[in-house]
Image: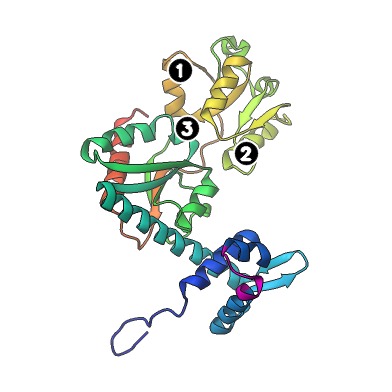
Amino acid sequence: MNVRTGQAPPSRLKLKYLQAVAVLDETHSLTKAADRLNLTRAALSKTLAALEDLLGVKLYERTASGMVPTTFGRALARHARMILGNLRSAEDELRDLMNEHRESLVVGALFIAMPQLLPQAIALLAESHPRCVITVRESGSFGLAAGLHDGSFDLVVGRLVPEYFRSAVELEPLFHEDLLVICRREHPLSQVPAPGWRDVAGYPWLLPPKESPISHALQSQFLADGVPGPGMIVEAFSVSLALGMLQTCNAITVLPSRLAHVLRDKGDVAILPLRPPPLPAPMGVAWRRGDPLSPLAAAFVETLKRCASASPR
């Protein structure tokens, strides 16, 4: 920092350095990265060497299996992705404003927010912002956090699992809810007064992928009841697949209570009287700390809060 002015000196990192690091982080190959960047392998190698000399650290280890990033390389790649993502977002937003005077917003969302919360919020937002472009991309909790950190998303809507989000993120909880076990209305267990975990383990289950906190918690619940778990498990982040399986066979799954109650009231599912483990975190919205929200993003956060408070628990 300049002591006289109180300002940080300009960065020595050029855009070409950031582009090289970001592409190398994806390909782990000088040859593939050079092709992507329309450079010769020798030119990219020279650029990388100049960058390492500039920073005074080694960014990559050259191995037989490819370019392996060091701790410094991984850190710089993370920042490079975020900076390049912000530049792409700026270009897209300016293009939209110039061409059609539209604001734009890229939202990452957990699959469970798709059927109910997001449609409600978008419908409400349309009343105050009738000319805008909202891009919604579905992902799991880990992918949402990674996309927010690297600039792929302006906002994310999902479970605010603390270990996925670093301190450089603003977290706004929207609501807490429970998990409920559901099946189709004609399922044999829907007529059983008090089914147990051993009973439901005898049927196919649709669960989030095994790395999901919910999947871990349910497997622990089966083991705590002396049951090894369901014999057949289909792993997917998909409400539509879950409902399709429930209607075509005697499958079982879990859904958050808000959505489960809506589906039950429509006559689509039955709720089994089992007590699953609690959800690992509240549903909420998150954005990067230090990056001011655009007017559209700020309005969308407010509509999410209004929809969350208006919906029944």
Mark 1 element type = helix
Q: Amino acid at mark 1?
A: Arg
Q: Amino acid at mark 2?
A: Pro
Residue that mark 1 sits on: 264
> Looking at the image, is mark 1 or mark 2 earlier in the sequence?
2
Distance, label 1 to label 2, CA atoms, is 25 Å
Distance, label 3 to label 2, CA atoms, is 19 Å
Instruction: Give neighbour class at mark 3: few <14, some 14-19, many 20+ (Cα, 10 Å).
Output: some
Q: Nearer the viewer, residue 219 or 59?
A: 59
Residue 303 place in picture, x, y as percent: 28, 40
Mark 3 element type = loop
| Depicted 15 relative to depicted 164: above or below | below
The quarter of the picture where residue 220 lies is top right
Is 190 positioned to the left or the right of 285 in the image? right
Part of the protein shown in magenta:
37-44
| Front label number (1 vs 2) | 2
Instruction: Give neighbour class at mark 1: few <14, some 14-19, many 20+ (Cα, 10 Å).
Output: some
Q: Is residue 39 magenta?
A: yes
Is 250 positioned to the left or the right of 13 in the image? right
| Depicted 164 relative to depicted 14: above or below | above
Residue that mark 3 sits on: 178
Q: Is residue 170 visible?
A: no
Distance, label 1 to label 3, CA atoms, is 15 Å
